[in-house]
Image (tube, grey):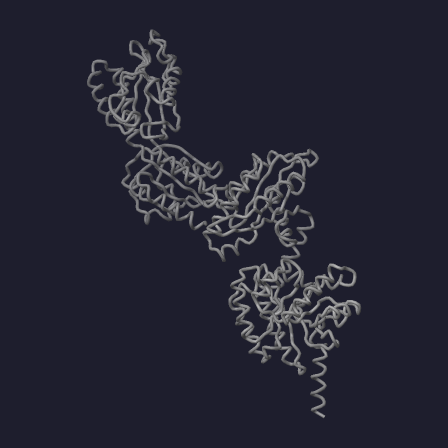
Amino acid sequence: MTASIDVMYRLLVQGVTDHAIFMLDPHGIVVNWNTGAERAKQFTGDEMVGRHFSCLYRPEDRAAGLPEAGLRQARESGRFQTEGWRIRRDGTAFWADVVIDAIRDEGGGLVGFAKVTRDRSDRRMQELQLLEAKETAERHRDALAATSTFLDSVVATMPSIVVVQDAGTGLIRLANRQAELLLCGCAGELVGRPAGAVLPDALAALLRTALAAAGMPAAAAGTPAAAAGTPAALTCEAPVPTAWGSRRLRMRALAIGGRGEAPLHGLLIAEDISEEHAASVRIHHLAHYDGLTGLPNRALFRQRLGAALAATPSDAAAGTCTAVLRLDLDDLKRINDTLGQPVGDQLLCALAGRLRDALRPGDTLARLGGGEFAAVAPHLATEAEAEALADRLIEAAGAPVEIEGHRIETGLSIGIALAPIDADSADALLRCGDLALSEGKRAGRGRPQRFHGTFAASARYRRLIETDLRGAVARRELGLHYQPIVRAEDGETIGYEALLRWQHPVHGPIPPLDFIPIAEETGLIHEIGAFVLHEACREASRWTSGRRVAVNLSPVQFRSPALAARVASALAASGLPAGRLELEITESVLLDASSNNLALLEQMKQLGVRIALDDFGTGYSSLSYLCAFRFDKIKIDRSFVREICDSREALAVVRAIAGLSRSLGIATTAEGVETPEQAACLRREGCTQLQGYLYGRPMPAKALPERRAAQGAVLSTGS
């Protein structure tokens, strides 16, 4: 997205030839120079890029520190605007309007400045000429005719609108060609007519105000000219309806004459700055809004959050709080991978509208990038209001979206943090929201999670785990334990399941539930999974009994198309026959990009390995899985085994799975068998294999009976 905005900005800037537009880095060094700048300054981009922009100022302006003052004001307030003399390469000076905008990244950091300079020398000279001509006419009445002719010539050729109104009658005395073309579309429609009737309201009102400020209300016929006060110049900028549609004009009005016998008139000079304004607005929009959804971006969100916190009482007992909600769209990567980026973008736009509509008036929703959003909700009376708001957002995101014939269903995970209860600064509050979001996604996607203080300690522990896990394989801290799998009818061991263990040198044993999810999130699971495959195959190849070894595969490993090749490599390196390797997968493999994953399963099946469906009966278990792929085994989850002797429902599920497997000719393994009563019940229901503490706990390879038997055989042969 950032690259897209950069390209759009460059195309916009390079297409402008009548404005000098160039970019500065945070220190004022020129980093970009457009065609308009080359024309106005007489320097090429190669000559200016890398130089400090103050070289374009006159020596006395540099000595006065004007360039630095402009950058400082733009850095502090976001914009600096002025006009004054500047110099060209040949040393000539020109009068310029200058705008400097500060450009910030999504994190709020200063990236640099956009400087727009427009040559106003002609306008300045013409204005000076007009004023000089007016003064000359007043001082030299005998030269009035010649001066009038000169003024008429100047006014007629000016590119700006020039209108003169008679203060006594309210009629327009003079209107140049530019005024007639822009305001009426043809000549002869303004002069001699009442200004209030033919001029747009904004122009007529500005003339009236300028005349009133001079002490002579417009159209007040009969008021003595001597009553007029000192002329006052007024300036404003606004959209004005014209013959060519709405145009943005920069307008200046002042009263002239009104001294002695000279009649009082109102002089209006207006300039069409529509293109300049549109470019400025576009630059501002790109700096503050997301280019895809039109929502505020990270920089604008931080501004809104700062304003909300400034208005939030610092005392939690005051009864008013501000909520920050961190939102993450579930499964966006999967949708992009399977349906394509354009569909994912349309989904983001549709959900952005829904989420915005679910907020209250005054709340702000921003897109931070990818499927990440954030909302700030000020003036909440209770914590329950924040949780109710999160529930509305989740409900809004949960409804299906129809895009290009696809019915897409997704979810939203939300982390909630409150100020001043959890934190009182923007950075701290966002960190709390991020921690709550991460904890909520780990606990189960698609729901809101309120921040708790324990999350910070949990995050530190997870960062420690992630850091140490990166080198755990190389340091040989990871190892495998093996749990027996027995034949149900006679209790004979027929294989072992390889289970990963981590013995941390400082913290001791780290539970798999603590580090496996981290390995999946960081991508380390691919390296660790390859280690487990090679180690399990190497160990099983030493067993003279010919028993099988079962290895669990993470759903994340299926995102790599090289998975089947890694399995083949482990078999080849160890010499283990493929039929003695059993790979266990969970149903999420079939839920996530199932067509691709089914192809990987078929590749591994062709190697000769056995494929088992683990934890069947939980989650979204579907009979369609058994039709889509021919599994060698179904594993019944321990949650059903634990309740089988006491729960009719658990017994019914086990009976159904066993009966289905028997009909399909598929073996069944019941996990978590701990009592003889459970084993007996499972045998009665037709389960073919059992696994659990009743038959043995996981043990290191050196403690396996296989090892002892192999060693005994070696000793016997040696004797």
The answer to whether residue 32 shows anywhere in this view is yes
Image height check: is 307 above or below 602? above
Which residue lies most toward the front here? 663
The answer to whether residue 477 shows anywhere in this view is no
Image height check: is 590 above or below 308? below
Instruction: Residue 418: give x, y in percent of width and height.
Output: 64, 41
Left or right of 15 on screen, residue 102: right
Residue sitting nearer the eye, 476 or 96: 476
Instruction: Residue 676: give x, y in percent of width and height.
Output: 79, 69
Left or right of 521 on screen, residue 37: left
Residue at position x 54%, y 48% in the image: 400
Q: Quadrant of the C terminus?
A: bottom right
Where is residue 134, by image quadrant? top left
Residue at position x 34%, y 46% in the image: 48
Instruction: Residue 16: give x, y in percent of width and height.
Output: 33, 41
Residue sitting nearer the eye, 470 or 143: 470
Left or right of 145 on screen, residue 330: right
Instruction: Residue 371: give x, y in percent of width and height.
Output: 53, 50
Residue sitting nearer the eye, 582 or 634: 634
Which residue lies most toward the bottom here? 719
